[in-house]
Amino acid sequence: MSARLSFVANSDRVELEIDPSARLIDVLREALGLVGTKEGCGNGECGACTVLVDGKPVNSCLMLALDVEGREVTTIEGLGGGQGKLSIVQQAFVDRGGIQCGFCSPGMIMSTTALLRAHPSPTDGEIEAALVGNLCRCTGYKQIVESVKAAAATLRAQRGDSHV
Amino acid sequence: MVNTLEELPSRPRCAAPPQHERGQRAKSFEYHRPASLNQALELLGGGTARLLAGGTDVLVRLRDGRLRPAALVSLSHIRELSHIELGAPIRIGAMARIAEVLENQALCQLLPALAEAAQTLGGAQVRNLATIGGNICNASPCADTAPPLLIQEARVRIVSTSGSREVPLDDFFVAPGQTRLAPGEVLTEVMVDRPAAGTRSTFIKKGRVRMDIAIASIAASVVLDGGRCVRARLAAGSLGPRPMRLRAVEAAILGRVLDGSTLAAARSAAEGEVTPITDLRGTADYRRHLAGALVVRALMRLNDWRGP
């Protein structure tokens, strides 16, 4: 069986023929080669597969790809300015050691990006609540939370001429 | 003396959920994405197609093979099912996402127990997908939104090509995963009456970690008149085969001041009324203890209530 799917992936309109059982993560990684999005548990528990759909973080392992018809999907590849330029959130995770093995990082960074767009000055409680669906087995979360705060501070300092 | 696992009197009886292999794929199926409820009802017919709401449960079961539908009818592009209307009654569309319930501050003020439950339902990524209708129709005994809706005596609207009917939520749940929904029917909205003035309500969930499935949950709502309880509604999750009203607890506290002896009566009524099982999250004994403890905690919280 196959079905037609059309949506926006990181500002590019894409049209595909896919199997209806394909999940969003399958289409992103296999059909579009956007392998920055990781599959951890496949059950919606670890958050490694987090992407933004119409700006909101979702588990791409829990969505049928056909359900994003007409919607806008942003993956980790869509955050920086292209040519390897990192977004402020990505740079903060690099600078503050918010990355160790790196497997959870794309999901952490997508969740953080959505958080900071909605709450430019999040409290510790808001950071914890925003990241409760993202598991990290290396860092113990301390450096991750510090990365989120550093990104928030940079964004506030640059407010007006920057974008998360 | 510390018991080893082998010495525990009741080992978990519930089998571990089937594990999927990395790369395992769902069996293929037909997929439909209707734009209106009428189209969805026609596609459903009386047949074997399965409804897809937020997908947070269905996608897991498709992948591990517990669910093998011939066809899926996705409701995600039907705008008319996503409404939240704060009239009398309050109407919440079946496809309203849990995150949309939480973002509606007026709704959260009116139904604080529902707001508290929505906050503990999964992480942000799940709340942006999961829907109130999906949480109900999934009919899990641990459904987080069920106890807070049961204490509001919620009704659900069920629509098919041959008409529409209203069912009290308390009658809608039959058994784990089973509801009164017949083939060809769609749950379109949840309705609750606006709480009476002075209603206090709260929700407490015991899970292992913050976004976890409930080991036990309690929703409670009271109206106090001079400290005396003149209306009481309590409901429980993960403490029986379906989300359940705790009518014995309600009877034990009605007409009484919420003092130590009333709370003791509420605790023993709760422990006697629930019918929990032992599974991988907790034993039946532990859950029965939690039922009493959480009921007492909820009632103490409501007695000292300072607003949502």
Image (cartoon, coloured by chain):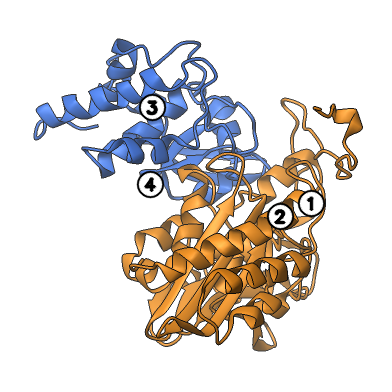
Chain colours: A blue, B orange
Residues tagged by mark 1 and mark 4 found on one chain of the structure: no
Q: Are marks 2 and 1 on the same chain?
A: yes
Residue B192 in the figure: left or right of residue B27: left
Disc 3 marks a residue whose amino acid type is Ile
User: Distance of mark 2 from mark 1, alpha carbons?
Assistant: 6 Å
| Residue that label 2 marks | B289
Q: Which residue is mark 1?
A: B285
Q: Position of residue A17 (x, y in %)?
A: 60, 40
Q: Secondary structure at mark 2?
A: helix
Q: Is residue B195 left or right of residue B13?
A: left
Q: Three-letter amino acid code at disc 1? A: Asp
Residue A29 on image: x %, y %:
55, 26
- The quarter of the picture where the C terminus of chain A appears is top left
Q: Alpha-carbon neighbours of circle 4 within 10 Å: few (<14), some, or many (≥20)?
A: some
Camera-nearest residue between B234 and A71: B234
Is A115 placed left or right of B111 in the picture? left
Calculate the distance from the C-alpha at mark 2 to the C-alpha at mark 3.
Answer: 41 Å
Label 3: state its secondary structure.
Answer: helix
- Residue count near mark 3 (Cα–Cα under 10 Å), binned few <14, some 14–19, many ≥20: many
Q: CA distance from mark 1 to mark 3?
A: 42 Å
What residue is disc 4 on?
A: A54
Q: Are marks 2 and 4 on the same chain?
A: no
Element type at marker 4?
loop
